[in-house]
Amino acid sequence: RDVNMRKNEAYLKERERGFDLRFQPSSSQQQQPPGYNALRDVNMRNFFESESVQKLLLDTGQVDPFGRIISLEKHRSRLRIIENEIERAERLQRVMEKDEDDARYLVRRERFGSIERKRRLGGVERRKSETKMQLDL
């Protein structure tokens, strides 16, 4: 009995050494691990066929309106073009906002400048009238 137990332990140890989760490609395989796509998993089909999940997948752009899977690998160039357009639009938006802020600043500066000139001119006129009144006395 003790011998069988040792053999069993040795067998289990050997199996444990053979179990490795790290990807080690053989010479015939490519250097990347095989990809997993849950949308193509037959065991997950029932989950992905539910109406709420289909709506979510459609909203996030993972499937088309007919339920076909959209491959990002195939559409990567289109995706990059869209990302570039979004980036360009965001830059343009920032430039427009900066121009608008600059225009507001110039209008504000002009208004405050005219108010300041009127105030100074009013002060000069007031001093002139005070001086004239003193001279008349």
Image (cartoon, rainbow, N blue to C red):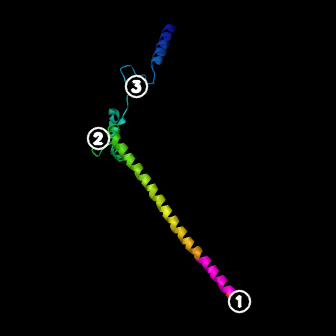
Q: Residue furthest front?
A: 135
Instruction: State the CA–CA distance, disc 3 to disc 1.
Output: 101 Å
Q: What element carries label 3?
A: loop
C-alpha span from label 1 to label 2: 97 Å
Q: How crowded is mark 3: few (under 14 residues within 10 Å), some or many (20 or more)?
A: few
Query: Quick one: which residue is furthest to the left in this view?
Result: 66
Q: What residue type is labelled 3?
A: Gln
Cα–Cα gap, marks 3 and 2: 29 Å
Label drawn at residue 31: 3
Image check: 96 left or right of 72?
right
Indicate the quadrant where residue 127 lies.
bottom right
Could you tell me what secondary structure mostly forms the magenta stretch? helix
Residue 135 numbered mark, or none? 1
Q: Horizontal and vertical percent for residue 44?
A: 35, 35
Q: Are marks 1 and 2 in contact (CB under 8 Å)?
A: no
Residue for badge 2: 68
Closer to the camera: disc 1 or disc 2?
1
Is 137 located above or below residue 111 in the figure?
below
**Identity of the residue drawn at 70% across and 91% down:** 136
Which is nearer the eye, 129 or 39? 129
Say which element carries label 1.
helix
Q: Are marks 3 and 1 in contact (CB under 8 Å)?
A: no
Mark 2, Cα crowd under 10 Å, few <14 / some 14-19 / many 20+, is few
128 vs 82, left or right, is right
Which numbered mark, 3 or 2, is in the foreground of this view? 3
Q: What stretch is highlighted in magenta?
A: 118-131
**Where is 58 relative to 128, above or below?**
above
Give the mark nearest the N terminus, 1 or 2: 2
